[in-house]
Image (cartoon, helix red, strand yellow):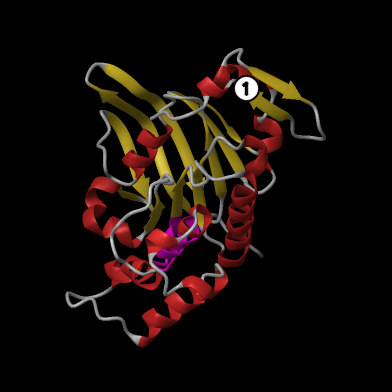
Amino acid sequence: MKTSYKMKKIIEIKNLEVKYGKEIVLSDINLDIKENEFTAILGPNGAGKTTLLKVITGIIKPTKGSVKILGKPVERIGRNLSKFIGYVPQYIKENTNIPITVLNAIKMGRYPHLGVLKYLKKNDKKIIDDIIGFLNIDNFKHKLFSELSGGQKQRVLIARALVNEPKLLILDEPTSGLDVNTSEGLYSQLDKLHKKLKITILLVTHDVMAVSEIVSNIACLNRNLIVHGKPETVLTEENLKCLYGKHFMLFGHGDIPHIVVKKGDINGGN
């Protein structure tokens, strides 16, 4: 008798609440993300999206509730959490003056698996070379990171996260500040990455339509979790009104609608 394979839960969030002083930023969040899923988190300004990522990565402790990564409470994993999670922060437009090459920046992502001396072995170098090749970084790997374009920088940050061989890749608005063509190219790379490496991806974004065709699931967050499911069932007019209020326009196009949101309602946020 054949038994069906049960997907492991990479993230388990139960009854989560986060307060900044007396202000409740996140309330009663219950969310499971399983292995190999590609999940996008959508939400307006101040919805608590970045705060949720900080709780998942152990930066912020919740006021109530629990977060588990691979079945273990985040607080018990401690420093070893960096071995399971690859994190790509929000895009920073300003160039850094730190004189580090692309290759050395990527190598740093491998450090959680190395010893005290941070010595790269043959297998470590192969992992780094494979990721550099997959993300088409080879032709500028010896350049200074500060000399790169915005899209190139994001690919380097993704590479640095991936050489860690994480079980979970987290990206916090990776296309913020990038032009449309560069953003589309980055999403295409993420789609290929997910399909080839079979990695679990959690992505915070405002690009609703850009990601709706490549993600497995969408979680709509506005301090509470409004809905979580497949794009075609989540992106309804009723759900979007709960998420963005009245300041959005909905255009029908196939199974998934096109959305235009008032600019001031979507930029920034926790």
Q: Nearer the viewer, residue 109 or 36?
A: 109
Bin the neighbour count of mark 1 within 10 Å (Cα to Cα): few under 14, some 14-19, many 20 and up.
many
Number of marks in the rendered image: 1
Give the residue at the far right of this rendering: 254
| Residue 65 left/right relative to 131 | left
- Residue plotted at (62% across, 22% down): 240
- Residue 61 in which image quadrant: top left
Residue 156 percent coordinates (x, y): 45, 62
Q: Is residue 258 above or below residue 199?
A: above
Identity of the residue furthest to the bottom in this view: 122
| Residue type beneath disc 1 | Leu
Residue under pointer 1 = 240
Query: In the figure, is residue 36 to the left or right of 106?
Result: right
Is residue 106 highlighted in magenta?
no
Q: Residue at x 31, y 58 (%)?
A: 82
Q: Nearer the viewer, residue 259 or 166?
A: 259
Query: Is residue 9 in view from this perspective?
Result: yes
Which quadrant is the C terminus positioned in?
top left
The stretch in magenta equals 154-168
Q: Is residue 244 above or below residue 227?
A: above
Q: Is residue 161 visible?
A: no
Local SS, label 1: helix
Residue 128: x, y in percent?
43, 75
Q: Is residue 163 magenta?
A: yes
Instruction: For the N terminus, give its image quadrant.
Output: bottom right
Instruction: Identify the residue shown where x is 46% and y is 25%.
Output: 45
| Residue in view at x 55 percent, y 67 percent | 135
Give 129 or 212, whichever is nearer the viewer. Answer: 129
Measured from the top left, where is residue 226 in percent x and y? 53, 24
Secondary structure predominantly adopted by residues drawn in magenta? helix
Residue sitting farthest toward the left? 116
Q: Residue 65's image quarter? A: top left
